[in-house]
Image (tube, rainbow, N blue to C red):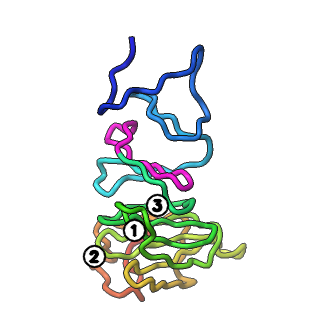
Amino acid sequence: MSSPSLRGRPPREAPPGGETHGGTELVQVDENRLEIPAGPFTIVPGLDYHSLLLLQDDRLARLGPDGVTITQQWQLPRPYKFIAERRGYFVAAAEEPSVIELIHKLSGKVIKSFPVNRRKLTDLALHPTRPICYVAFWASSDLPGYQFAMFNEMTGEGRESEDYIGNWLRVHPAGLVSGKIQDSLSKASVCLQT
């Protein structure tokens, strides 16, 4: 007995006598299983927190609330290490070359690109209410070894400081610092947990 098709797509048939592994494309095998190609991938929540974004190199897929159903797929302009979602675009961070890029959701084209001039990126976080993104990176073998930079997504202006220390970034959901929202890019506009 075969499982029912999901949203009009029949499940992929396994080859005779075995499981499927190590394919080159993201495939929904059946209603309970998703086959992800070999290699590193990242899963982050979508903008609405009712979907997941699965990033693998230059491929991006939106998964439904069940974490298995593929609802959208994109071929991205280059391989990215991190991605996050805004209303009309994605914010993506690549290491080779080391850039932050804004990618239009409908066309898949790069809207803006700004160099990070750093290697070994470790995280990407978005300010929840302002068009500002934060990128953490390995700065040096001296302590503190990890720092982060802030980028204004509209102007491309970036801000870096030896005081911006962090490896894994999380932004307060309201974008608060000591109970108030900071307006200037020159000030740290979030509480970061590192």
Q: Nearer the viewer, residue 172 or 43?
A: 43
Question: Of tags 2 and 3, which is closer to the observer?
Answer: 3
Q: Position of residue 32 (x, y in %)?
A: 40, 28
Which of the two labelled residues, at mark 2 and mark 3, occupies the earlier sequence position? 3
Q: Is residue 45 above or below residue 173?
A: above
User: Would you say the residues marked 2 and 3 are in contact, meaning their CB atoms lie under 8 Å apart?
Assistant: no
Rendered-image quadrant of the N terminus: top left
Q: Residue furthest right?
A: 141
Q: Is residue 53 above or below residue 168?
A: above
* Alpha carbons under labels 1 and 2: distance apart: 19 Å
Which of the two labelled residues, at mark 3 and mark 1, occupies the earlier sequence position? 3
The residue beneath circle 1 is 126
Q: Which residues are magenta?
A: 54-71
Q: Residue at point 61% right, 35% down? A: 22
Q: Any mark on residue 83, and which?
A: 3
Q: Is residue 29 above or below residue 115?
A: above
Q: Looking at the image, how many numbered discs can be counted on the residues?
A: 3
Q: Position of residue 145 (x, y in %)?
A: 65, 72
The residue beneath circle 2 is 179
Q: Residue furthest top?
A: 1
Magenta highlight on residue 50 = no
Amino acid type, residue under disc 2 in the picture: Gly
Magenta highlight on residue 61 = yes
Q: Nearer the viewer, residue 74 or 164?
A: 74
Relative placement, left or right, of 157 versus 23 is left
